[in-house]
């Protein structure tokens, strides 16, 4: 009889195979071949999703992991920009334009970014395969993107990059953005309409400046230094330093990574609370809503050990906040906005996500807390055995929520491999 872990792994492999999209796009006749997040809900190629898919695919076929990144790199723009969505299949454009028209830069890609997970994915592929030729192929556009982020998304030159709307963090409806998005507290059912109205206002404000993206952050309509985004950015800079074969470039990216980590510790750390806060607006007002982002610098192996210990002991393992039956919830259970049962019908307001657990798992191991990492992996697999391969999960019951057969939840394959000693 198959064990619980083997059943979850088999289901994850099924999803990675079933979500594959192949064809030749009307976009310059480019061939596409990638894993979409969900065929019925999210049929396009998302930037950070594909990076997560590539990591999971290493447990299926490393060549497919490389293909995932190669397909993504076809969307890289000459100036270094990489869009958060590639809309390969033209037959689905009409529906996408209705939903995403305010963010489209082109019929085939969006004008917004997502967290730069791709550098970590490429390093994992290289560590698994030793394929230096693949790195030489895909590293140049990734390097250009990280330089684009510095040039266009750090308007105050403090080493922290800013996002210009909630979708850019991938955490679309997180309650930490509520104040800037004018979302008032009230019945959960009222959250989504308010969010849509806030997004409409945001993009009406940005519309006149689309041709000059460097000015958008300076408008201070939604200029947000997000802790999670910057932790992933710092990690990505460090990964590029390890991947490049140019010593001077390695020094450049290693130094930049150190400056981002130092800026997080200097500007975002709250020593009284023992957590990191996002910074809202040019005034850099701390956004004191306790979400998993407040813990995310744990993914940086050079984080001050004292801060790492406080994040783990005071928050992650706190059964009133994050250490729920199926951790790690996207919002601390102590927050008024905590919505574990998905009553708001929108995302990142309470449920648990596998990609968050995956990042924190490796962060815990980097900080010598393999015991907690293993417990997190075990609870994640148990959650998925109960709820299936879903977009997110109720942190109290393990019930699956959101899209079915959701791609990045297959990161569980990497957790299982790590726990079994093959990673």
Image (cartoon, grey):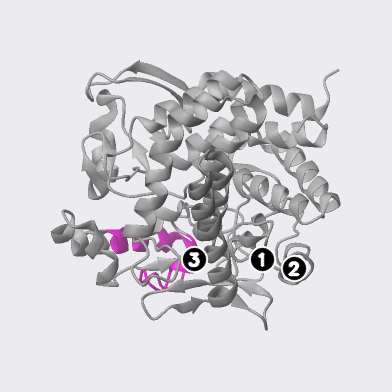
- The location of residue 318, given as percent across then percent down, is 77, 67
Residue at 55%, 47% (x, y): give it. Answer: 241
Residue at 48%, 22% (x, y): give it. Answer: 67
Location of mark 1 (residue): 333
Q: In this view, does 60 lie to the left or right of 7?
A: left
Along the line of sight, which residue is nearer the eye, 10 or 162?
Answer: 162
Q: How crowded is mark 1: few (under 14 residues within 10 Å), some or many (20 or more)?
A: many
Q: Is residue 285 visible?
A: yes
Q: Quadrant of residue 173?
A: bottom left
Q: Is residue 263 left or right of residue 164?
A: right
- Check disc 2 and report its element: helix, strand or loop: loop
Residue at 66%, 43% (x, y): give it. Answer: 399
Location of mark 3 (residue): 175
Q: Is residue 408 visible?
A: no
Q: Earlier in the sequence, mark 2 or mark 3?
A: 3
Q: Is residue 109 above or below residue 208?
A: above
Q: Earlier in the sequence, mark 1 or mark 3?
A: 3
Task: Say whether marks 2 and 1 touch (CB < 8 Å).
Answer: yes
- The location of residue 339, given as percent across then percent down, is 58, 60
Q: How far apart are marks 2 and 1 (CA)?
A: 6 Å
In the rendered image, the residue lying farthest to the front is 247
Location of mark 2 (residue): 320
Task: Say whether marks 2 and 3 touch (CB < 8 Å).
Answer: no
- Residue 77 on the magenta span: no
Q: How far apart are marks 2 and 3 (CA)?
A: 18 Å
Task: Say whether marks 1 and 3 touch (CB < 8 Å).
Answer: no
Along the line of sight, which residue is nearer the eye, 236 or 68?
Answer: 236
Q: What stretch is highlighted in magenta?
A: 174-199
Q: Is residue 352 above or below residue 180?
A: above
Q: Is residue 274 above or below residue 342?
A: below
């Amino acid at each position: 009889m198959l064990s619980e872990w083997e059943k979850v792994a088999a289901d994850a492999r099924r999803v990675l195979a079933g979500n594959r999209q192949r064809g030749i796009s009307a976009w310059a006749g480019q061939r596409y071949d990638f894993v979409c997040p969900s065929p019925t809900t999210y049929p396009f190629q998302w930037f950070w999703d594909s990076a997560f898919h590539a990591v999971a695919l290493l447990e299926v076929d490393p060549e497919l992991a490389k293909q995932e990144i190669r397909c993504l790199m076809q969307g890289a723009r000459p100036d270094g920009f990489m869009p958060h969505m590639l809309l390969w299949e033209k037959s689905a454009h009409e529906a996408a334009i209705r939903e995403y028209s305010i963010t489209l830069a082109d019929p085939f890609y969006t004008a917004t970014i997502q967290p730069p997970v791709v550098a970590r994915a490429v390093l994992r592929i290289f560590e698994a395969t030793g394929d230096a030729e693949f790195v030489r192929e895909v590293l140049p556009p990734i390097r250009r993107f990280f330089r684009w982020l510095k040039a266009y998304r750090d308007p105050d030159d403090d080493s922290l990059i800013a996002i210009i709307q909630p979708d850019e963090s991938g955490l679309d409806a997180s309650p930490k953005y509520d104040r800037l998005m004018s979302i008032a507290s009230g019945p959960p059912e009222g959250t989504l309409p308010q969010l849509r109205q806030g997004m409409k206002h945001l993009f009406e404000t940005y519309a006149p400046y689309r041709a000059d993206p460097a000015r958008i952050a300076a408008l201070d309509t939604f200029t947000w230094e997000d802790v999670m985004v910057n932790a992933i950015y710092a990690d990505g800079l460090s990964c590029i330093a390890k991947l490049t074969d140019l010593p001077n470039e390695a020094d450049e990216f290693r130094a930049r990574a150190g400056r981002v980590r130092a800026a997080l510790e200097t500007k975002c750390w709250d020593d009284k609370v023992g957590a990191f806060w996002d910074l809202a607006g040019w005034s850099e007002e701390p956004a004191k809503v306790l979400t998993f982002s407040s813990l995310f610098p744990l993914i940086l192996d050079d984080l001050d050990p004292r801060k790492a210990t406080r994040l783990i002991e005071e928050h992650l393992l706190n059964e009133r906040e994050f250490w729920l039956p199926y951790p790690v919830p996207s919002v601390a259970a102590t927050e008024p906005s905590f919505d574990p049962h998905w009553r708001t019908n929108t995302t990142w307001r309470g449920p648990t996500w596998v990609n968050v657990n995956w990042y924190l798992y490796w962060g815990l191991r980097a900080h010598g807390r393999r015991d907690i990492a293993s417990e997190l992996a075990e609870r994640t697999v148990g959650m998925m055995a109960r709820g299936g391969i879903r977009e997110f999960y109720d942190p109290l019951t393990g019930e699956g929520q959101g899209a079915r057969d959701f791609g990045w939840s297959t990161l569980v394959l990497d957790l299982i491999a790590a726990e079994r000693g093959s990673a």
